[in-house]
Amino acid sequence: MPKLTWQRSSYCPEGNSCVHVATAAETIHLIESGDPRGAILTATPAAFDALLAVLKEETPRV
């Protein structure tokens, strides 16, 4: 796997556990900052777009 440059989610306040995203040539990678050496979720750009669409649709209203 190539060296990845991780970017923290813009929805993540300082000090909280949040999602980090990195991109490679044909893949998108996600990790949870509370366990940065844990599992890395890898998806295609199309699958990542579909995930974001579902998350946006199912965001609970407060």
Image: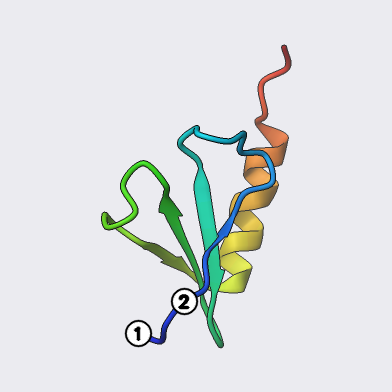
18 sits to left or right of 33: right
Mark 2 crowd level (few <14, some 14–19, many ≥20, 10 Å Cα): few
**CA–CA distance between discs 2 and 1?**
8 Å
Residue 25, located in which quarter of the rendered image?
bottom right
Which numbered circle lies on residue 26?
A: none
Badge nearest the viewer, 2 or 1:
2
- Residue drawn where x is 34% and y is 54% of the image: 36
Mark 1 crowd level (few <14, some 14–19, many ≥20, 10 Å Cα): few
- Label 1 sits on residue: 1
Secondary-structure class at tag 2: loop
Secondary-structure class at tag 1: loop
Q: Position of residue 57 (x, y in %)?
A: 71, 36
Q: Position of residue 30 (x, y in %)?
A: 47, 59
The amino acid on which the numbered mark 1 sits, given as a three-letter code, is: Met
Work out whether 62 lies above or below 38.
above
The N terminus - image quarter:
bottom left
Q: Position of residue 21 (x, y in %)?
A: 54, 61
- Label 2 sits on residue: 4
